[in-house]
Image: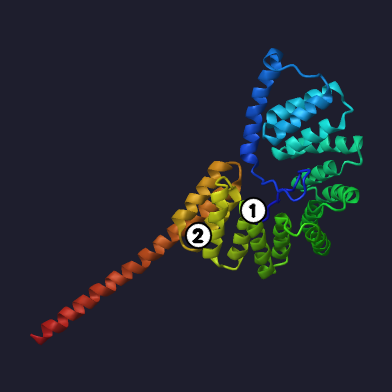
Amino acid sequence: MLYIRSLNINDKPGVYISNSTHWIAAAFFAALLAAQAVHANPTSKASAPLTAKADVNTAKADRKNRNFGAAALECAAAIKLDPGYQPSYHVLGAVYYTTGKYRQAVPLLSKAVALDPTDATSFECLGASQAQLSKFAAAIVSLSHAIALKPIIASYYSNRGYCYIMKGEYVKALTDFNSALRLGPTYAVTYANLGDLYAAKRNDTLAIQNYSEAIKLAPRDEDPYRARGHVYAMLRDYNAALRDYNAALALRPTDEVALLDRGFAHEKNGNYNAAISDYSEAIRLCPKDDRGYTYRANALREQRKGANEIKIFVLPLGLLLLLAGVAIYKRIGSKR
């Protein structure tokens, strides 16, 4: 099962943002409503210089503290005060990226790089947003600009390498991952992406090896557990797959893909009740995704089929035992 890995948007290289956008988006809208209330009543807020730079500095602090709604409003205020101030677009684009609103992020980040073509972090964030929208060719162009501006950042190569995987250009992907490892040998995302590369090529041994290294370096990131579990499932080692899916879901219980994958592993192990439970939870989390309904229907059908097969087996077995009992009775009776 394919999934899009989160791409780094931090100014500091080697920091990985997990793709937990469901709760982040909810927090974003809640904070946005609260921030709107504050902005609507200026007396409730300490007076500050009405400059775009001041608003953006406040927005950066709010974004760092995950007050995304407030950060978005502050950036919007900065843009209104000075439409030519580039950091406003960069920070607002980064806020939208972090909250999973990639379509809104792209035009803002495009404006940021147009205003300052030397801003490598804006190019990286733009490439990350394009990749999340499956616009991998455009993402590669943006990330290549970032690399040209700052060729010493491991995450830029790692992210571009992932885009090359998605385009099926495995040689270029491997070249980028080697560059990333040379610059950042402990950057866990590169190992996870290498795992994706080898999984795509069905080199399962190297895929597991690289996912395991990613887990060792970043044990709180659920993606490599889920990805390694998928490789184990492809190898029909469903018990190993279940261990990894359990680990992924312990870190993020709302991971729909991990629930679907774990349901599949349970199903293959003949544990239909557990499979149906996982599929039902996936449906609850993402009711618009057809896969949960399809997989649950298949599991229910297989469960009924298994129950019917047991009945078909038990019926002749009971009849056979009855006939055997009659035969024994007749033999005993004949001896009398």
In this rendering, the answer to whether 11 lies above or below 74 is: below
Of the numbered discs 2 and 1, the one sitting upstream in the chain is 1
In the rendered image, residue 277, in percent from the top left (x then y), is placed at 47, 50
In the rendered image, residue 336, in percent from the top left (x then y), is placed at 7, 85
The residue furthest bottom is: 335
Dividing the picture into quadrants, the one containing residue 77 is top right
- Which one is closest to the eye, mark 2 or mark 1? 1
Q: Amino acid at mark 1?
A: Asp
Q: Is residue 282 left or right of residue 51?
A: left
Q: Is residue 36 left or right of residue 324?
A: right
Dividing the picture into quadrants, the one containing residue 88 is top right
In the rendered image, residue 179, in percent from the top left (x then y), is placed at 82, 60
- Residue at point 79%, 45% (across, down): 130
Q: Amino acid at mark 2?
A: Glu
Task: Calculate the distance from the C-alpha at mark 2 to the C-alpha at mark 1.
Answer: 22 Å
Answer yes or no: is residue 177 visible. Answer: yes
Disc number at residue 22?
none
Answer yes or no: is residue 300 visible. Answer: no
- Residue at point 54%, 58% (across, down): 264
| Residue position marked by numbered label 1 in the rendering | 223
In this rendering, the answer to whether 52 lies above or below 106 is: above
Q: Secondary structure at mark 1?
A: helix
- Residue at point 36%, 69% (across, down): 313
| Residue position marked by numbered label 2 in the rendering | 267
